[in-house]
Amino acid sequence: MPKPAAKRPALLIVDMQVGLFHGPQAPYQGQRILTNINRLIGKARSAGAPVFFARHSGPAGSPIEPGSPFWQLLPELAVDTASDVVFDKTRPSCFFATDLGERLATLGVDRLVIAGMKTQYCIDTTCRAAAELGLQPLLVADAHSCMDTPVASAQTIIEHHNLTLGGAFVQLQDTDELAFACALATP
């Protein structure tokens, strides 16, 4: 009987950009989220898991148009340009009109650990898309954020999305609980 292929995790950091993080409205618990994301990057590297950074690109003239200061990834992020993959997207899904799915398949990744911004847009959409594509998404419950809106606080939005996505679309874990070796196990 053939041995099943080993499961391999990857880390996806979504839209941790200057304009979103240091813009007119700060993300909820931004420094804690950034610290947790950098810890996740360290854990992924120690386990030999690939690290991907999605960067949202707006149209020409927008604050996050390609090449603009606000479009850049946060300098505080532990990006290793020699080994990490940075890619651009124009929609909430990290898979729409990008080669992320193909890159993950080429690397044998079937477990996608997701963190970043904004919870109700790109995090939500990417989690759902990853599940639909047959990946096993794991959302790091304490490593995604957004800002308050006129109808809900950022804390409420984050709690709502953890509840809504958890189980149906993703496995949830906190940064302290997550070990990339554990992410290899089937939930």
Image: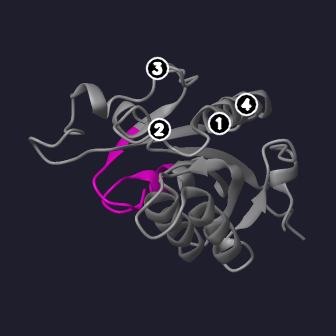
Q: Judge from the rendering whether residue 37 lies leftward or rightward of residue 84; answer left or right.
A: right
Instruction: Please identify the quadrant where the N terminus is shown.
Output: bottom right
Residue 10: x and y, percent? Answer: 65, 46
Q: Which residue is mark 4?
A: 39
What secondary structure is found at the residue carrying circle 1? helix
Q: Is residue 122 above or below residue 82?
A: below
Q: Quadrant of residue 121?
A: bottom left
Q: Which residues are magenta?
A: 87-103
Query: Image quadrant for the C terminus?
Result: bottom right
Q: Secondary structure at mark 4?
A: helix
Question: In the rendered structure, which amino acid carries the disc numbered 4?
Answer: Arg
Amino acid tagged 1? Ile
Please report the residue visible at 61 percent of the width from the left and 33 percent of the height from the top: 34
User: Label 1, label 2: how many angstroms apart (C-alpha)?
Assistant: 10 Å
The residue where tag 2 is placed is 16
Does residue 4 appear left or right of residue 28 in this picture? right
Q: Which corner quadrant of the image does residue 179 belong to?
A: top right
Judging by the rendered image, the residue that carries numbered circle 1 is: 37
Residue 129 point in image, percent of width and height:
50, 70
Q: CA distance from mark 2 to mark 4?
A: 14 Å
Which of the marked residues, 2 or 4, is nearer the chain's N terminus?
2
- Confirm or deny contact between disc 1 and disc 4 (CB under 8 A): yes
Label 2, label 3: how many angstroms apart (C-alpha)? 10 Å
**Could you tell me if the residues under marks 1 and 2 are in contact, i.e. CB atoms within 8 Å?**
yes
* Residue 93 falls inside the magenta stretch: yes
Identify the element where label 3 is drawn. Answer: loop
Q: Amino acid at mark 3?
A: Pro
Q: Which residue is mark 3?
A: 75
Mark 4 in CB contact with mark 3 (< 8 angstroms): no
